[in-house]
Image (spheres, rainbow, N blue to C red):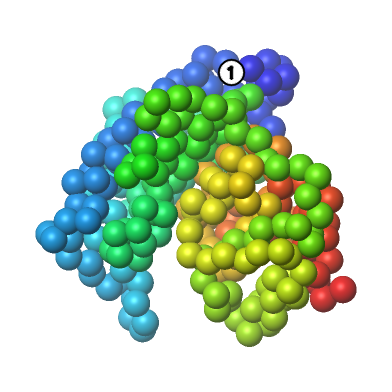
Amino acid sequence: MDRDLEQGRGRTGTVISAETASDIMQTAHLLADAARGETLRLFRSPELRPDNKAAQGFDPVTEADRASERAMRAILARRRPQDAILGEEYGATPGSSGLTWVLDPIDGTRAFMAGAPSWGVLIGVAGDSGPVYGIVDQPHLGERFEGGFGIARLTGREAQTPLACRTGVDLAQATLMTTYPEVGTADELAAFTRVARQVRLTRYGLDCYAYALLAAGHVDLVIEAGLQSYDVMAPIAVVQAAGGVVTDWKGGAAHGGGQIVAAASPALHAQALELLAGS
């Protein structure tokens, strides 16, 4: 258990006892297990029928998204009814504990629709000023990335290994990822391109899985824009637990969403911020 938790206070300032932390982690794994069942039931299935929830453009949602979030909410109602919930599909439910479960039942629904195993289930727990714990789960691959309360680990089907961001990598040798080539607005795309021109490799399209790969030491930077809190709360917890740095593009708190830069090291983070600012 990390020193912050032993002193009864999480990194965000929310008081969390060791007993509460243990219950949070046990509950989070139950949520992830339930979401696996619901999502895998329809992944690569001919019965998948996506709906479009956008008034303009295409913002897909499937019954797998909805069923996954319903299953997780049902567990929270039984085990931790005092906690608040913020979910992508069913919105906000108030609580009294000072803790909020932030759920994205399928992050990467477009990948899910295409049969690509780069989507994930995001389970974040937030205190009064940001994430204290998170899981990024990839059900099809059987990979669960976990961070918080002194833990940073990847649990696979056959083994459990520690998570640690890659260090000692300069910008010129870095691997950069984002979900869409057309990042945000024209100005945001221009800022992203300034960074992309300086790295060794830029890749696209992995949604939350890019943050998981950063925490595992395979990717050095993830830069995105236009995100929601439920897109980033769990990935931030995992990346930070693995030694990485996550902020907005100005170096501020990132858990509210918007513009996100996640870096494997403080030095790389500083280089990326400078380029994003136009320097």
Judging depth in this view, the residue of 225 and 228 nearest the camera is 225
Point out the image quarter for the N terminus.
top right
Residue 22 visible to an observer of this rendering: yes
What is the x, y in percent for residue 118? 41, 54
x, y percent for residue 193: 69, 76
173 to the left or right of 226 = right
Q: Secondary structure at mark 1?
A: loop
Evaluate whether residue 260 shows in this view: no
Q: Is residue 52 above or below residue 258?
A: below
Label 1: which residue?
A: 17
- Which image quadrant is residue 277 in? bottom right
The percent coordinates of residue 244 (x first, y second) are 70, 43
| Residue at image location 78% in from the left, 54% down from the top | 269
Query: Which residue appears farthest toward the left when viewing the image?
Result: 47
Is the C terminus in the top left, top right, bottom left or bottom right quadrant?
bottom right
| Image point (84%, 66%), residue name | 274
On screen, residue 154 above or below 245: above
**Percent position of residue 169, x then y:** 78, 50
Q: Amino acid at mark 1?
A: Ser
Q: Is residue 259 left or right of residue 136?
A: right
- So how many labels did they put on this image? 1
10 Å crowding of disc 1: few (<14), some (14-19), many (20+): some
Between 23 and 36, the one nearer to me in the picture = 36
Residue that sits furthest to the right in the current view: 279
Image height of 268 relative to 110, above or below: above
Residue in front for this viewpoint, 104 or 207: 207
At 36% from the left edge and 83% from the top edge, which residue is drawn?
56
268 vs 157, nearest the viewer = 157
